[in-house]
Amino acid sequence: MDQFDVDVRSPGAHDAEVYQQLRLAMASRSDVPDLVMMNCITVPEFTETGI
């Protein structure tokens, strides 16, 4: 079975900070995470960008 190393990070103290960091990463096209956990209310904003 394959094993994976997972690096868990929280770029902010609350949801708004996390989403802002994700927006910045997407705008700069660098360090965009492979996986993001977010509130269902904000999902449409990010799906429109193609994530």
Image (cartoon, helix red, strand yellow):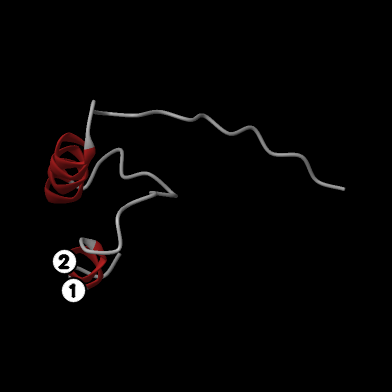
The total number of labels drawn is: 2
Look at the picture and state if 5 lies above or below 16: above
Query: What residue do we see at 19% from left, 45% from top?
Result: 19
Q: Measuring from the top left, give residue 35's x and y in whole percent.
A: 44, 49
| Amino acid bearing label 1 | Glu
> Which of the labelled discs sits on residue 12, or is there none?
none
Q: Which residue carries the number 1 mark?
A: 48
Image-quadrant location for residue 13: top left
Q: Measuring from the top left, give residue 10's x and y in whole percent.
A: 34, 29
Q: Quadrant of the C terminus?
A: bottom left
Look at the picture and state if 44 lies above or below 12: below
Query: What residue do we see at 58% from left, 34% from top?
Result: 6
Marks 2 and 1 in Cβ contact (< 8 Å): yes
| Amino acid bearing label 2 | Glu
Q: Measuring from the top left, give residue 12's x and y in whole percent.
A: 23, 28
Q: Secondary structure at mark 1?
A: loop
Q: Which residue carries the number 2 mark?
A: 45
Image-quadrant location for residue 5: top right
Q: Secondary structure at mark 2?
A: helix
Near-viewer residue (28 or 19): 19
